[in-house]
């Protein structure tokens, strides 16, 4: 067996084994950071390798310990999972590289080794969810990542971090429990936990009550995990009070993983086996999505704290993704998956820029960031360009997302036109909240203590952060001009998922 | 050089020079001379594409596909060529004028100002050369975003508020109306390319087409149809060179240019004539035309009056497009040129008056003609051209539009055009009459001899020896040239008209 054949398990196991090492060594210097970063970067490299394998030769199936699949645990990596693996490991690496100084400023050195250990566990969990082909395994990995996440959020510099973490814990546990109950029902009806196998066997018991109940529990559980409106309250809170690097990591990927599981369950298990489920799914989810992006964008317009503002913006952006899923069409899934990818790029860039502001000015509150454009021009310019992508101006990644989403929506007839109008309304609100930052940064005089010409000195964010920020901004434009990678992955995945329904 | 190279060169030059301006910002003489130099080079490059377009060629470059079937590409046809020539030609004069104005008025952040200005020209050329609606839209948005810092330039509360309205309306209409129009067009026809005769007539029913027309015409917020015209008066808080080039030429003309492009190359004139909403848009344009003129009458601030006058003049072109016949569209195309020269002259004059005499209100202009005769005479020529009086260029565009209305048998529109001309006279001539015929207020004359000289050494302009106080030569020369331009355009309109008509005939 060559190493390349072992990549699917390696990407999960690598951070899992390094994490306890970090916790045991518990050294104080920069060593834990370095180890975590290198591990994370390695997983990213593996994820890229896996993606190129998938693009070249289709889905990879891997039987753990060589046990054949219905008996042992199987890993399946298709185009969608490959993309998620890339997003997660990439976001983690980006957050670690950019976040070292923020971490030093916000977290006590004695806790850092343990925090990085938790970080790698969270990474393990998120990667595991994406890689596994087993429904129960998803739950296990979900718990690994969630428990680690609670610890990470609780390490935030302010005391509110504890309540934020507690809210997160309560919601997360509820979500995971619901999910487990649902999986329990499915196991009861089919006697298997492997998703592919389950999909075949569900055919015999389709449209039975337990399966429907299972569907309900699983959807609700995942919606809680994914912060789908109106179950989003924990998310902006957690982003605001978590240590900034943690916020970067989670904003770019964590809730997307829950959406990924939702997408798989819907399209591989529920839709093929529940007759009227498609109508049910659309009629419940579409209103929630509309509420999500309208409320998310509207609240973001009035937030003064940048991290919180971006948290609410994420509520809106995730609603776009779910909207694509709920259309039950190949175009819809394609749009969702493209936005998976693009939103990760956009949000990571925005949060990295905010991290830079916090490192230098100790605050992410707009009232204290007046005139910041003169003091850290490159950082703020990066923020604005990523914001332009969030709005969806042509030549940015955000535009590609909008274009595909609206094309998918327009195929729905009259409903589509109404949805288009609402989506565009939400985009306009994005203009307002991004421009609020522009005005404060460029056209407002610095607040107290920094007044006068003399005080305006360049205080650019730390170099690694700046490099990461601009790499992300460049990626936003690169994938706005040449979006072939996300598009080809998305269309491949959409074809295989929708193929399952028909 | 091949035409392809020239097109790419024309687009990349202003972008490169924007960077150069940003880098050389510390040395302002170097920066400013580079800027004028780059503007001249740019104009030469654009002008050297002209011969092959006149010969009937449609030079084009396709860069790459962004999404399958959606290319970023450029192709030059007569309308775009004319718009590009006007924008780049007047950019030369504006860059010279801008130096005089910005130094004279002692504005801050001049480097940011000129750098953004260059990007705006880049975007205007992109709009002019766009091969399809998608490319046009990209540059249209770049134009909105790059001019935002110019409008908010002063950083005062008023400037920020103005800029917010400016960006809000322009982005709002483009994302809220124009983008969906494009999406629907794409979804129904599978293309967004500009094609002679249009792309809609075979694929889109008349009822859907009518709604699309409404989305397009109101979505092109830069054409300032009411009720989406507020951004233009708001933009007047910007320094005058911005108002002159961008809000009399590049930005607003990009708007009406897009209207013409969409009418001629997406809808096609025949299809357009058959839509009920063409009449609706025409009536809205007629209303805008008159209402904006009436508002202009009531404005006492010179720049505000000129802004509303622009709103009104833009509607001439929209109206021309909606009349949907060759004469009216030719008139609309001509009006892009004629109004550009007339209005930029007026704005140059308004800026010169501000720099030399610090006056912004029309009521303060009594007797100004004695101190600034050259400026005020140029103002008179610009005003007459905008009014449409012979022997000035503005006459021809209005003449063609009138003929177009006659041809379309829209009697009411003929009346609207004539009425509007009267209104134009009523709001554009009073400043000139005050300046030349009334005597200057007394205290002003005293002021002039006491403090003025010491305070504004570097603003002291041309002609002090003769008891005049004109603006600096950097301001005076460009405004004289554009004023002369309005006169010349009357006599040399033939080739331009022929060039525009070649859209329909294919030959000149």
Image (spheres, coloured by chain):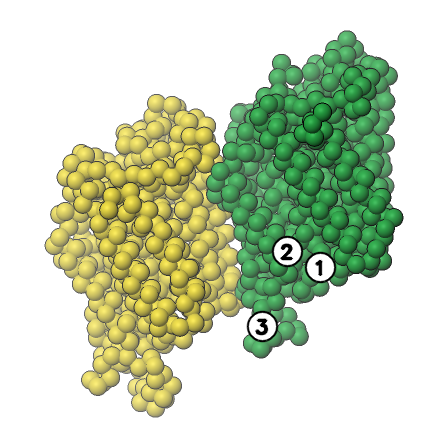
Chain colours: A green, B yellow
User: What residue sits 51% from the left and 43% below the top?
Assistant: A478
**Residue holding disc 2:** A465
Q: Which residue lies furthest to the top in this view?
A: A204
Task: Categorize mark 2 by other alpha carbons within 10 Å: few (<14), some (14-19), many (20+).
Answer: many
Mark earlier in primary sequence (3, 1): 1
Front residue of this view, candidates B487 and A356: A356
Q: Give A151 or B302, whichever is nearer the viewer.
A: A151
| Label 2–label 1 contact, CB within 8 A | yes
Q: In this view, does A432 lie above or below B326?
A: below
Label 3: state its secondary structure: loop
Q: How far apart are marks 2 and 1 (CA)?
A: 9 Å
Which residue corresponds to mark 3?
A: A456
Q: Earlier in the sequence, mark 2 or mark 1?
A: 1
Image quarter for residue B73? top left
Q: Position of residue A316 (x, y in %)?
A: 65, 41
Badge 3 or badge 2: first in the primary sequence: 3
Which of the image's four quarters has the C terminus of chain B?
top left
Secondary-structure class at tag 1: helix
């Amino acid at each position: 067996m060559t190493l390349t054949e072992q990549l699917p398990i390696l990407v999960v196991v690598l951070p899992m084994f390094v994490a306890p090492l970090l916790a045991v060594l518990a050294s104080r210097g920069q060593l834990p950071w370095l180890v975590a970063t290198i591990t994370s970067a390695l997983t990213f490299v593996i994820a890229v390798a896996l993606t190129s394998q998938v693009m070249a030769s289709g889905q990879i199936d891997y039987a753990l310990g060589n046990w054949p699949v219905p008996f042992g645990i199987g890993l399946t990596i298709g185009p969608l999972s490959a993309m998620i693996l890339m997003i997660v490991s990439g976001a983690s690496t980006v957050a670690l590289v950019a976040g070292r100084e923020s971490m030093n400023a916000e977290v006590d050195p004695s806790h850092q080794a343990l925090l990085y250990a938790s970080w790698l566990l969270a990474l393990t969990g998120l990667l595991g969810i994406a890689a596994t082909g087993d429904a129960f395994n998803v739950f296990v990995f979900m718990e690994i990542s969630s428990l680690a996440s609670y610890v990470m959020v609780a390490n935030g510099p302010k005391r509110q971090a504890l309540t934020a973490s507690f809210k997160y814990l309560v919601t997360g546990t509820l979500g995971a429990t619901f999910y487990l109950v649902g999986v329990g029902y499915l196991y009861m009806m089919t006697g298997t936990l492997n998703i592919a196998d389950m999909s075949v066997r569900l055919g015999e018991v389709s449209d039975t009550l337990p399966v429907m109940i299972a569907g309900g529990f699983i959807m609700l559980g995942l919606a809680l995990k994914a912060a789908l409106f109106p179950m989003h309250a924990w998310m902006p809170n957690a982003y605001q009070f978590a240590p900034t690097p943690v916020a970067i990591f989670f904003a770019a990927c964590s809730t997307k993983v829950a959406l990924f599981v939702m997408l798989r369950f819907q399209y591989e298990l529920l839709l093929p086996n529940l007759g009227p489920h498609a109508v049910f799914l659309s009629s419940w989810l579409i209103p929630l999505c509309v509420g999500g992006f309208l409320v998310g964008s509207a609240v973001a317009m009035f937030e003064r704290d940048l991290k919180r503002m971006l948290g609410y913006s994420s509520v809106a952006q995730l609603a776009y993704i779910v909207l694509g899923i709920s259309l039950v069409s190949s175009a819809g899934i394609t749009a969702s998956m493209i936005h998976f990818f693009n939103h990760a790029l956009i949000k990571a860039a925005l949060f990295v820029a905010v991290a830079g502001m916090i490192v230098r000015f100790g605050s992410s509150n707009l009232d204290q960031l007046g005139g910041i454009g003169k003091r850290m021009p490159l950082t703020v310019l990066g923020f604005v360009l990523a914001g332009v992508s969030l709005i969806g101006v042509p030549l940015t990644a955000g535009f590609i997302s909008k274009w595909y989403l609206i094309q998918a929506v327009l195929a729905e007839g009259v409903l589509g036109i109404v949805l288009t109008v609402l989506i565009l309304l939400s985009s306009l609100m994005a203009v307002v909240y991004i421009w609020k930052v522009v005005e404060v940064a460029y056209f407002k005089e610095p607040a107290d203590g920094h007044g006068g010409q003399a005080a305006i000195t360049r205080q650019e964010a730390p170099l690694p952060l700046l490099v990461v920020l601009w790499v992300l901004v460049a990626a936003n434009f690169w994938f706005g001009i040449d979006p072939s990678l996300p598009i080809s992955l998305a269309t491949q995945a959409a074809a295989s998922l929708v193929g399952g329904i028909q | 050089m091949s035409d392809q190279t020239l097109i790419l060169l024309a687009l990349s030059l202003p972008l490169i020079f924007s960077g150069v301006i940003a880098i050389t910002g510390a040395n302002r003489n170097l920066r400013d001379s580079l800027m004028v130099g780059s503007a001249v080079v740019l104009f030469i490059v654009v002008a050297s594409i002209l011969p092959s377009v006149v010969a009937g060629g449609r030079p084009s470059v396709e860069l790459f596909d962004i999404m399958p079937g959606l290319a970023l590409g450029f192709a030059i046809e007569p309308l775009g060529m004319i718009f590009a020539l006007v924008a780049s030609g007047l950019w030369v004069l504006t860059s010279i004028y801008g130096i005089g104005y910005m130094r004279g008025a002692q504005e801050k952040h001049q480097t940011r100002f000129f750098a953004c200005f260059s990007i705006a020209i880049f975007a205007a050329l992109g709009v002019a050369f766009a091969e399809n609606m998608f490319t046009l839209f990209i540059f249209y948005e770049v134009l909105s975003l790059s001019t935002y810092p110019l409008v908010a330039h002063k950083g005062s509360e008023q400037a920020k508020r103005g800029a917010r309205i400016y960006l809000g309306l322009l982005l709002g209409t483009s994302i809220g109306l124009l983008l969906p129009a494009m999406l629907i067009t794409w979804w129904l026809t599978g293309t967004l390319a500009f094609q002679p005769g249009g792309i809609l007539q075979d694929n889109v029913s008349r009822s859907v087409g009518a709604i699309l027309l409404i989305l397009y015409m109101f979505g092109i917020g830069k054409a300032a149809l009411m009720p989406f015209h507020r951004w233009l008066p708001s933009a007047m808080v910007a320094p005058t060179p911005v108002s002159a080039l961008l809000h009399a030429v590049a930005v607003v003309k990009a708007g009406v240019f897009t209207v013409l492009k969409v009418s001629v190359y997406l809808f096609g004139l025949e299809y357009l004539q058959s839509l009920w909403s063409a009449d609706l848009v025409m009536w809205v344009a007629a209303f805008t035309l008159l209402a904006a003129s009436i508002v202009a009458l009531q404005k006492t601030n010179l720049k505000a009056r000129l802004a509303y006058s622009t709103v009104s003049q833009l509607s001439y072109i929209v109206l021309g497009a909606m009349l949907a016949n060759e004469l009216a569209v030719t008139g609309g195309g001509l009006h892009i040129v004629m109004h550009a020269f007339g209005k930029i002259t007026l704005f140059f004059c308004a800026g010169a008056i501000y720099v030399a005499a610090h006056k912004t209100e029309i009521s303060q202009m009594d007797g100004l003609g004695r101190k600034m005769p050259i400026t005020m005479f140029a103002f008179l020529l610009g005003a007459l051209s905008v009014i449409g009086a012979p022997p000035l260029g503005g006459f021809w565009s209005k003449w063609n539009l009138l003929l177009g209305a006659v041809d379309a048998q829209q009697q009411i529109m003929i009346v609207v055009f004539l009425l509007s001309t009267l209104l134009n006279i009523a709001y554009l001539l009073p400043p000139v009459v005050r300046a030349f015929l009334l005597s200057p207020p007394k205290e002003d004359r005293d002021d002039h001899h006491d403090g003025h000289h010491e305070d504004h050494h570097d603003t002291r302009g041309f002609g002090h020896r003769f008891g005049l106080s004109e603006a600096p030569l950097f301001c005076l020369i460009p405004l004289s040239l554009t004023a002369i331009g309005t006169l010349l355009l009357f006599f040399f309109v033939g080739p331009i008209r022929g060039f525009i008509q070649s859209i329909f005939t294919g030959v000149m």
